[in-house]
Amino acid sequence: MLHLVCLLLLLLSATLVHAWIQYPPNGFATMTHYSLPQDYVASCGCTPSSTHFPTAALSQMAFGSSTAYGPACGRCFNLTLLNTFLSDPPFYPSVVKSVVIKVTDLCPISSDWCTATESKPNQAGNYLNFDLAFPSPSIPSDFFPSNATLYGYTDFGVWNISYASVSCNTSWAGASDAAAVGSVTSLSTSGCCPADPTGSANDTCPSYSDNNGIPPNTGTSDAKSRVALYTPALIITLTQALLISL
Ligand SMILES: *[C@@H]1O[C@H](CO)[C@@H](O)[C@H](O)[C@H]1NC(C)=O
Ligand SMILES: *[C@@H]1O[C@H](CO)[C@@H](O)[C@H](O)[C@H]1NC(C)=O
Ligand SMILES: *[C@@H]1O[C@H](CO)[C@@H](O)[C@H](O)[C@H]1NC(C)=O
Ligand SMILES: *[C@@H]1O[C@H](CO)[C@@H](O)[C@H](O)[C@H]1NC(C)=O
Ligand SMILES: *[C@@H]1O[C@H](CO)[C@@H](O)[C@H](O)[C@H]1NC(C)=O
């Protein structure tokens, strides 16, 4: 009985470590930007050509995995710039700028604006940060509004934005380019980048770090051949910890 209680506690603590952020389809977030080399295969393992279109990394606890792919991979969001708030005074652009991105990368919890956890938002009070791949051949270089006369610089770094979940198939610029959709097929680089994840288990990536089983079919042949790597090892580790602790 004691053994069982200990094991349950250990399993519970292992679960709590992965308290992924559940977020509504629409809301507010922060947006930063980062350099993603063209044709780079980022965390989700989306095809190199996905970088020819607007993409972003999502903050780790919303992304849903601490490495490789997670449930956010492949999802598309319409991101709209609202205002800057680190600048003095805050900047409210007179134009409305939006971009539909596909999530192809993980923004680590260790990086500045991607620190939010279920219980603690980031410095702006948000639970999500989208790190836009910018500059990008698909996004105009003057995408971010600015007022150099007033501020003396043009890159505000962090924006307050609104986000809206959208269908990739109908709204993402890369959807019509077959080479930009799906995940890499090389077996050495496991990826999970669905064309248009709906949240259903058959078209949405599992959490690589939780690894609950075989990733869903993401439309490429390699997706079917991947196996669960961590679950048995985790249970052995937990069992060993249990035996040692007794
Ligand atoms: C994105 O949001 C902007 C601002 O609300 C809106 O004008 C635009 O139509 C949206 N685009 C898509 C594809 O949903
Ligand atoms: C972001 O915009 C929303 C909507 O206008 C506003 O309620 C919120 O205070 C803003 N947050 C920041 C950090 O500017
Ligand atoms: C920049 O800021 C100044 C001072 O507030 C204002 O007069 C000017 O219209 C602004 N320009 C733009 C492009 O927003
Ligand atoms: C999106 O398009 C792909 C083809 O690129 C198709 O396989 C998939 O079923 C579509 N998904 C949805 C939700 O319409
Ligand atoms: C996924 O399952 C849903 C029902 O849960 C079904 O409507 C949909 O067609 C399935 N998609 C694929 C790609 O198998």
Image (cartoon, rainbow, N blue to C red):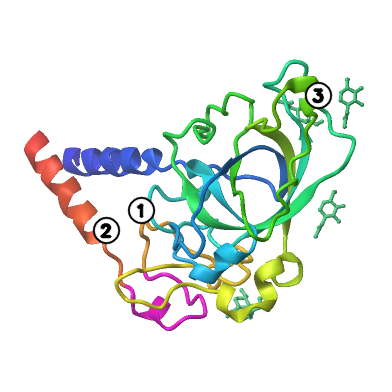
Q: Is residue 181 visible?
A: no
Q: Residues within 10 Å of mark 2 (few under 14, many from 20)?
A: some
The answer to whether mark 3 is within 8 Å of ligand 3 is: yes
Q: Which residues are magenta?
A: 214-226
User: Which callout, 2 or 3, points at the residue further toward the start of the chain?
Assistant: 3
Question: In the picture shown, does residue 44 fall above or below 110?
Answer: below
C-alpha gap between disc 2 and disc 3: 54 Å
User: Which callout, 1 or 3, points at the residue further toward the start of the chain?
Assistant: 3
Q: Quadrant of residue 8?
A: top left
**Could you tell me the amino acid type at mark 1?**
Ser
Which image quarter holds the N terminus?
Answer: top left
Rendering coords of residue 203 (x, y %): 56, 71
Q: Residues within 10 Å of mark 1 (few under 14, many from 20)?
A: some
C-alpha gap between disc 1 and disc 3: 47 Å
Q: Is residue 188 left or right of residue 84?
A: left
Do callouts 2 and 1 mark residues in contact (Cβ within 8 Å)? yes
In this view, the mark in front (2 or 3): 3
Question: What residue did someone put label 1 on?
Answer: 209
Q: Is residue 239 left or right of residue 133?
A: left
Dot 1: element = loop
Question: What residue did someone put label 3 on?
Answer: 149
Task: Give me the residue at 52% from left, 47% from top.
Answer: 35
